């Protein structure tokens, strides 16, 4: 194999630029030519494919996001979109693609292989929901960012003796909520993988205040935000003192 391409797709994740840099420089050291596909699968179909060299990826290792940009392109789920993408790759003499992204990006790469075009994936998503790897690119940074924000939120929560419900990202995986919640000492952690009852959570929080706690942090996975909005309207979430009803 003499010529490959690399793309980033879906939501951006911290570390994507570092991953692109590693792919480009390692491939060059192996004697390959490397092309960058801009704007994910949308750029593949549109022919936004340009050569990259070692200097192209200089000074990007510490930058967030992805310098190749990203875009969601649902049309790639259809056979017509996939074949158009492969046509553009062949037009540029590309023999294989490295896809950096999450679940949807991996499905796109799988479709390419089903058409006989070589593709491999690097797990780049803050959700940590890719099978076959302990941690995905961006997950650790997402947890650290959440922890930093929560440490500050706790100060306000304690000052006002309020229960704070912290909503984090993660789509259908509760990893960010679980890791950040444990690390910051959350009283309740609610994730999609486990069932829960609002009544039990309210009772637990109330019991904490009755035992003298000044602040309570509860973590909610983003996937539950619609149900969370209903709870926010209830004054039972706004305990001020241990003697509250």
Image (cartoon, rainbow, N blue to C red):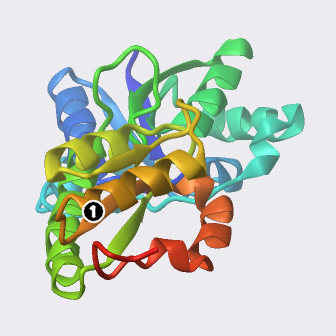
109 w.r.t. 205: above or below = above
Query: Which residue is rendered at x = 60% and y = 62% of the image?
Result: 225
The residue under the point 86% across, 31% down is 79
Please rate how many residues cluster around mark 1, counting C-alpha atoms within 10 Å: few if below 14, some from 14 to 19, many from 20: some
Q: Is residue 155 left or right of residue 163?
A: left
On the rendered structure, is 210 left or right of 13?
A: left
Q: Quadrant of the N terminus?
A: top left
Q: Measuring from the top left, give residue 133's x and y in whole percent.
A: 33, 19
How far across and how far down the image is residue 242, in percent? 28, 72
The one of 66 and 47 positioned closer to us in this rendering: 66
Residue 75, percent from left and from top = 81, 48
Can residue 126 be seen here? The reply is no
Q: Is residue 96 visible?
A: yes
Count of marks, rendered view? 1
Which residue has dot 1 on it?
210
**Residue 117 screen position, x and y as percent:** 63, 18
Q: Is residue 137 above or below residue 241?
A: above
Which residue is nearer to you in this view: 215 or 94?
Answer: 215
Residue 173, above or below 117:
below
**Label 1 element class:** helix
Q: Residue sitting at 39 percent across and 35 percent down?
A: 128
Q: Measuring 26% from the left and 52% from the top, which residue is drawn there?
A: 186
Instruction: Say whether residue 188 is left or right of residue 192.
Output: left
Vertical relation: 230 (above or below) 22: below
69 or 47: which is nearer to us? 69
- Kindly give the residue lying farthest to the bottom in the view shown: 160
For residue 169, side relative to residue 151 (left or right): right
């Amino acid at each position: 194999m003499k010529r490959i391409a690399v793309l980033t797709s879906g939501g951006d994740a911290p570390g994507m630029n570092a991953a692109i840099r590693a792919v480009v420089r390692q491939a060059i050291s192996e004697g390959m030519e490397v092309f960058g596909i801009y704007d994910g699968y949308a750029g593949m179909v549109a022919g936004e494919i340009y050569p990259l060299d070692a200097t192209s990826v200089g000074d990007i290792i510490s930058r967030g996001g992805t310098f190749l940009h990203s875009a969601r392109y649902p049309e790639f789920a259809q056979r017509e979109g996939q074949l158009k993408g492969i046509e553009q790759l062949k037009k540029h003499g590309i023999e294989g693609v490295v896809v950096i992204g999450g679940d949807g990006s991996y499905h796109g790469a799988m479709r390419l292989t089903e058409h006989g075009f070589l593709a491999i994936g690097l797990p780049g998503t803050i959700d940590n929901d890719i099978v076959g790897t302990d941690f995905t690119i961006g997950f650790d940074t997402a947890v650290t960012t959440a922890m930093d924000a929560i440490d500050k939120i706790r100060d306000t929560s304690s000052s006002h003796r309020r229960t704070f419900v912290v909503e984090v990202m993660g789509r259908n995986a509760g990893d960010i909520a679980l890791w950040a919640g444990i690390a910051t000492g959350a009283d309740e952690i609610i994730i999609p993988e486990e069932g829960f009852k609002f009544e039990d959570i309210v009772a637990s929080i109330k019991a904490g205040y009755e035992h003298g706690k000044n602040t309570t942090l509860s973590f909610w996975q983003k996937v539950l935000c619609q149900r969370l909005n209903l709870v926010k309207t209830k004054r039972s979430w706004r305990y001020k003192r241990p003697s509250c009803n």
